[in-house]
Image (cartoon, coloured by chain):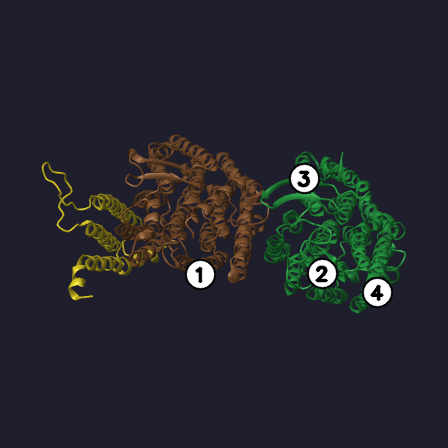
């Protein structure tokens, strides 16, 4: 495989890197908020994957225009899907933050090891 | 009532009895005990009512329902099961009379629970006796274990609970760990688990595996107490004596040897096993158990524990007799179940009566007790003689048959074992008899009389049965000969 | 009949208990009706919005989904019926409507996963049910629930995202999201590497959700600190549904299209299942908190289901599906009994529960019944699945005997941990001299007994779930060469 081909997949490389960055943050950070941020990054990587795959070369937004024939569209379905996934991701994040707020109220801290030590 | 209905009634009746006892227990002890007696009497009527059918070569059968394809709950009465059911139901009535005397005499707590569980255990016993296939048998086998657990742990203190844990642990783990895979193996290999005379496994299981499968059965059925899965039986002696008497000398342990005999006769088939060299080993653990358990019994100082080890040895008589694989020996196995049941229940009744009257539990305390409790000790002596196998007691008859089978098979191991164990039996029973009748009581002993009338009555009846079985064993032998008639 | 699945989806509208319960019952009734129809041999489908299957979002109910749907709605309805007294005690009054709303959302999400025939739709429903269950678990008065739920949220989201990546990859290669369509088209894909990666992502992601050992660390804590009724509901069905999707994907979509996928799946799942069974049972034997003990035992039981599935044979999958159903019955009943106990006992460590049987005889009797079913004593539902599982293991060739031994050893471990509970309840001296501990409220008790008796009923007459389980195994293996 030529170097150019590898570069041609750069979207996927970015996807993989972002995914790993997010996962690393989730695993290694002690602060619950930072964990959630990591989770968000992790999910964003997946959004990127979906958006990447729907791109058709030379395609444009999938809107039917009057008088234009043989228009090449990007695939609309993954976009729709990922819109849903984004909504899901946002609600997860919101719920996660809400839980962190409650944890803070109950324990007075948002550092994981302090919480584990408290019980 | 035809025999098919009678089977179902025999199982449902004790269940209904348990319910009635539970309800009656709220009203008062008299009503509760009346219910127990009525139920057990009715059960005898139902079970013994089937005898004529069996004698006429009838084999009533009934299928209740199919759980899974090929796996059904079915009952089928055959001579072995008939004998076992008749024995258990008959002794239940006597035992109930005795229980009333014992439980009242001791002022035990939770008596309602006691009688309810007893009735449940009897229902399970009937199920085991009449089971028409392995699955049904297993179902009731486990039910019997579980329903006796509250009886063993009746006292509820720490030591009792520990013993009950041993009891349940060994019985459940062997049945799930060994018995169940054996059953599934049979179903997978033969496609069925029905009890068929002559066996269902011939040609289905290859040679060396037959021995393995037999091992799974023999040690999986821990109720037969073949060493090393015998530990639960001494542990179970913490139960009130009526439980030890009926369940751990008759119903539960006999359910074990009964199941092994039934598996040998109806699943493997005697001839098939006889032709499979890999199954010959069964003789040795049984013989080993007989000798070792007798030796251990020699060293016991507690009456009930001595009786427990004696039971272990006697159970292996049945297993060994069944393993001789000759017609006379199979009959001997069945008769020994009966003879031992009469003798051992008498011994336990006597031990319990001694406890109620004097709170004595150790052997050395028995000096001169024969003079204070002549009836009890007379019965005890008859039971002990039957264990040794002295005529005119029931124990002699069964030993005769087993010996005849051993000669027929020219089985020297069995012969030697029987002779040696007879000597050992004498060695641990005769000193007790001597002590009780001929030695003097200690000077500062508390005076006491006989146990309550109900208890004494019950143990006299069983002692008479032990004697009577020597003379009137014809019907039993005739019934059991049906099993081997097809074999020769 | 065609609109039935839709009703299941549209009901998270109820606000208070009565509404919620009514909704739960209706959905259960629908599930029963659906199951009857499926038993009649029809696969029920419904195209949402009127678009036909490959394009629109389709719902489909076959034997396997009917079985799991029965389970989910049954558990939901039963738990709701019993929930009132326990919830009244644990959740403040003004938050109850929200609590029940979340509950219904969770129920709808789980039901949605089961009836959905569309991979992406499954993801959406999965997240709906997960979000709802996070809320439910965190809803109790126990502050330790919060870190537990946070852990669950993190791991659950990672699992769902893995699943999403896998689905995305499959979509890239096949251009469809409909499960049946995927199965048909995956054979045409030339380059199988992405599919292989997708299979890996999906399997791991769902295993996380299903708490397959060793990805189960979120489960014991979450179950232990959740409000008791929530534990009943979730223990009975949440992880089962994830397993359902896992089994469906692996045996329907991937199996014969990927070379050696059967072997790969078996080699992946079987050791994990065996380890899970043994390790979790061993841990449960020494656990001191009643709820955590039962939660840990759930991990072991999930191992059984996975083990059944990993045989990839008619008998194996039947056993797995049966065990899903039977374990839900047993564990649901156990947690219901725990909820009864918790009505009076604040502290659920075994050391505090001594002598409870004298005070709450009916509760403890029901607990013993369900415990026997968990062990697999004949005559109970648990026995049926053990029997099937051992039969399947015996058929599985040279490894079979080892697996039989594993199953038996873990059954013995189950005897140990169940009996620890029984001995504590019946024979230990009470730890506290608290007076006024009486039976749990009738409503709770009745449902507990209903479930306990169902354990017996399905142990003696398992025809309905068995037919469904056999049907599902046949359907799942239908694509096998």
| Residue wearing tag 1 | C271
The lab-note entry on whether marks 2 and 1 share a chain reads no
SS category of the residue bearing label 2: helix
User: Which chain is displayed in brown in the rendered image?
Assistant: C
Q: Are marks 2 and 1 in contact (CB under 8 Å)?
A: no
The lab-note entry on whether marks 3 and 1 share a chain reads no
Chain that bears disc 1: C
Choose the circle earlier in sequence order: 2 or 3.
3
Q: Is residue B484 left or right of residue B214?
A: right
User: Which chain is displayed in yellow in the rendered image?
Assistant: A
Q: CA distance from mark 1 to mark 4?
A: 54 Å
Q: Are marks 2 and 4 in contact (CB under 8 Å)?
A: no
Between disc 2 and disc 3, the foreground one is 2
| Residue wearing tag 3 | B15
Residue B273 is tagged as 2
Query: Observer-nearest residue: C39 or C347?
Result: C39
- Can residue B144 be seen from the camera position used here? no
Q: Are marks 3 and 1 in contact (CB under 8 Å)?
A: no
Say which quadrant the C terminus of chain B sits in. bottom right
Q: Position of residue B127 (x, y in %)?
A: 69, 45
User: Which chain is displayed in green in the rendered image?
Assistant: B
Q: CA distance from mark 2 to mark 3?
A: 38 Å
SS category of the residue bearing label 1: helix
Q: Are marks 3 and 4 in contact (CB under 8 Å)?
A: no
| Residue wearing tag 4 | B407
């Amino acid at each position: 495989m030529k170097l150019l081909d590898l570069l041609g997949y750069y979207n996927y490389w970015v996807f993989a890197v972002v995914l790993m960055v997010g996962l690393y943050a989730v695993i290694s950070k002690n602060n619950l908020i930072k964990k959630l941020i990591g989770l968000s990054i992790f999910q964003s990587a997946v959004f990127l994957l979906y958006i990447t795959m729907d791109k058709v070369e030379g395609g444009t937004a999938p809107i039917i225009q009057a008088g234009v024939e043989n228009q090449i569209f990007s695939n609309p379905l993954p976009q729709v899907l990922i819109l849903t996934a984004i909504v899901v991701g946002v609600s997860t994040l919101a719920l996660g933050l809400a839980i962190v707020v409650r944890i803070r109220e109950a324990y007075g801290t948002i550092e994981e090891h302090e919480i584990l030590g408290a019980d | 009532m035809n025999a098919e209905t009678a089977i179902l009634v025999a199982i449902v009746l004790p269940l209904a009895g348990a319910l009635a006892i539970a309800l009656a227990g709220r009203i008062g002890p008299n009503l509760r005990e009346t219910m127990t007696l009525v139920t057990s009497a009715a059960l005898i009527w139902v079970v013994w009512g089937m005898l004529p059918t069996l004698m006429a070569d009838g084999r009533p059968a009934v299928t209740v329902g199919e759980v899974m394809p090929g796996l059904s709950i079915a009952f089928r009465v055959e001579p072995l099961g008939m004998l076992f059911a008749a024995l258990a139901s008959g002794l239940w009535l006597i035992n109930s009379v005795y229980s009333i005397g014992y439980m009242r005499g001791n002022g035990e707590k939770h008596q309602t629970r006691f009688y309810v569980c007893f009735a449940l255990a009897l229902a399970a016993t009937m199920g085991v006796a009449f089971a028409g296939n392995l699955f049904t048998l297993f179902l009731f086998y486990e039910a019997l274990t579980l329903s006796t657990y509250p009886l063993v742990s009746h006292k509820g203190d720490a030591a009792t609970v520990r013993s009950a844990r041993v009891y349940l642990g060994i019985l459940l783990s062997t049945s799930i760990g060994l018995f169940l895979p054996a059953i599934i193996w049979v179903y997978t290999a033969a496609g069925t688990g029905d009890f068929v005379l002559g066996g269902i496994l011939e040609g289905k299981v290859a040679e060396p595996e037959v021995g393995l499968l037999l091992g799974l059965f023999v040690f999986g059925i821990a109720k037969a107490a073949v060493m090393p899965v015998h530990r639960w039986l001494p542990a179970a002696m913490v139960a009130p004596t009526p439980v030890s008497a009926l369940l751990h000398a008759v119903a539960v342990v006999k359910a074990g040897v009964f199941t092994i005999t039934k598996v040998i006769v109806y699943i493997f088939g005697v001839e098939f096993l006889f032709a499979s060299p890999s199954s010959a080993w069964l003789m040795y653990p049984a013989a080993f158990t007989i000798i070792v358990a007798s030796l251990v019994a020699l060293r016991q100082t507690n009456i009930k524990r001595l009786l427990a080890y004696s039971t272990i040895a006697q159970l292996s008589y049945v297993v060994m007799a069944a393993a001789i694989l000759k017609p006379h020996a199979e009959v001997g196995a069945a008769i020994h179940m009966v003879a031992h049941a009469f003798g051992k229940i008498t011994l336990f009744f006597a031990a319990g009566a001694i406890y109620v009257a004097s709170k004595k539990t150790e052997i050395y305390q028995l000096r001169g007790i024969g003079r204070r409790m002549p009836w009890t000790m007379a019965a005890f002596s008859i039971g002990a003689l039957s264990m040794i196998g002295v005529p005119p007691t029931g124990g002699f008859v069964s030993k005769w048959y087993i010996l005849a089978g051993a000669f027929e098979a020219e089985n020297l191991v069995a012969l030697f074992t029987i002779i040696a164990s007879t000597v050992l039996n004498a060695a641990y029973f005769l000193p007790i008899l001597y002590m009780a009748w001929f030695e003097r009581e200690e000077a500062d002993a508390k005076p006491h009389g006989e146990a309550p009338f109900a208890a004494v009555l019950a143990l006299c009846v069983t002692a008479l049965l032990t004697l009577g079985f020597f003379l009137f064993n014809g019907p039993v032998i005739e019934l059991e000969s049906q099993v081997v008639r097809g074999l020769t | 009949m065609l609109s039935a699945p839709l009703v299941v989806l549209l009901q998270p509208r109820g606000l208070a208990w009565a509404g919620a319960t009514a909704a739960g019952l209706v959905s259960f009734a629908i599930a029963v009706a659906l199951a009857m129809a499926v038993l009649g041999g029809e696969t029920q489908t419904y195209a949402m919005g009127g678009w036909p299957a490959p394009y629109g979002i389709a719902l489909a109910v076959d034997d396997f989904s009917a079985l799991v749907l029965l389970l989910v709605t049954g558990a939901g309805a039963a738990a709701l019926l019993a929930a009132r007294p326990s919830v009244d005690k644990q959740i403040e009054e003004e938050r109850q409507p929200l609590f029940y709303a979340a509950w219904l959302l969770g129920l709808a999400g789980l039901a949605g996963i089961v009836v959905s025939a569309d991979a992406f739709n499954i993801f959406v429903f999965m997240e709906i049910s997960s979000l709802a269950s996070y809320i439910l678990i965190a809803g109790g008065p126990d502050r330790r629930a919060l870190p537990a739920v946070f852990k669950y949220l993190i791991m659950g989201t990672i699992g769902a995202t893995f699943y999403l990546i896998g689905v995305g990859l499959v979509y890239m290669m096949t251009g469809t999201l409909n499960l049946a369509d995927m199965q048909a088209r995956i054979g045409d894909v030339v380059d199988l590497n992405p599919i292989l990666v997708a299979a890996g992502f999906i399997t791991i992601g769902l295993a996380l959700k299903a708490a397959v050992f060793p990805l189960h660390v979120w489960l014991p804590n979450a179950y232990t600190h959740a409000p008791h009724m929530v534990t009943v509901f979730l223990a009975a069905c949440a992880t089962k549904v994830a397993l359902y999707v896992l089994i469906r994907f692996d045996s329907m979509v991937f199996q014969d299209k990927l070379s050696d996928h059967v072997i790969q799946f078996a080699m992946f799942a079987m050791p994990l299942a065996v380890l899970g069974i043994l390790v979790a049972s061993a841990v449960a034997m020494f656990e001191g908190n009643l709820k955590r003990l039962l939660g840990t035992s759930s991990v072991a039981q999930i191992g059984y289901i996975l083990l059944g599935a990993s045989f990839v044979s008619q008998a194996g999958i039947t056993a797995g599906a049966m065990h899903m159903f039977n374990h839900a019955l047993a564990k649901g009943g156990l947690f219901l009994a725990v909820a009864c106990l918790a009505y009076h006992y604040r502290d659920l460590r075994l050391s505090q529960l001594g002598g409870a049987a004298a005070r709450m005889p009916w509760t403890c009797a029901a607990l013993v019944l369900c415990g026997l079913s968990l062990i697999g004593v004949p005559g109970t539902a648990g026995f049926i699945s053990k029997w099937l599982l051992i039969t399947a293991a015996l058929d599985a060739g040279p490894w079979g005997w080892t697996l039989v031994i594993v199953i038996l050893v873990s059954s013995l471990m189950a005897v140990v941990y169940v009996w620890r509970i029984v001995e504590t309840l019946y024979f230990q001296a009470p730890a506290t001299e608290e007076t006024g501990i009486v039976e749990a409220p009738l409503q709770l008790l009745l449902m507990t007994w209903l479930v306990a008796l169902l354990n017996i009923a399905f142990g003696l007459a398992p025809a309905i779930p068995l037919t469904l389980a056999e049907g599902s195994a046949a359907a799942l293996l239908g694509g096998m060469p």
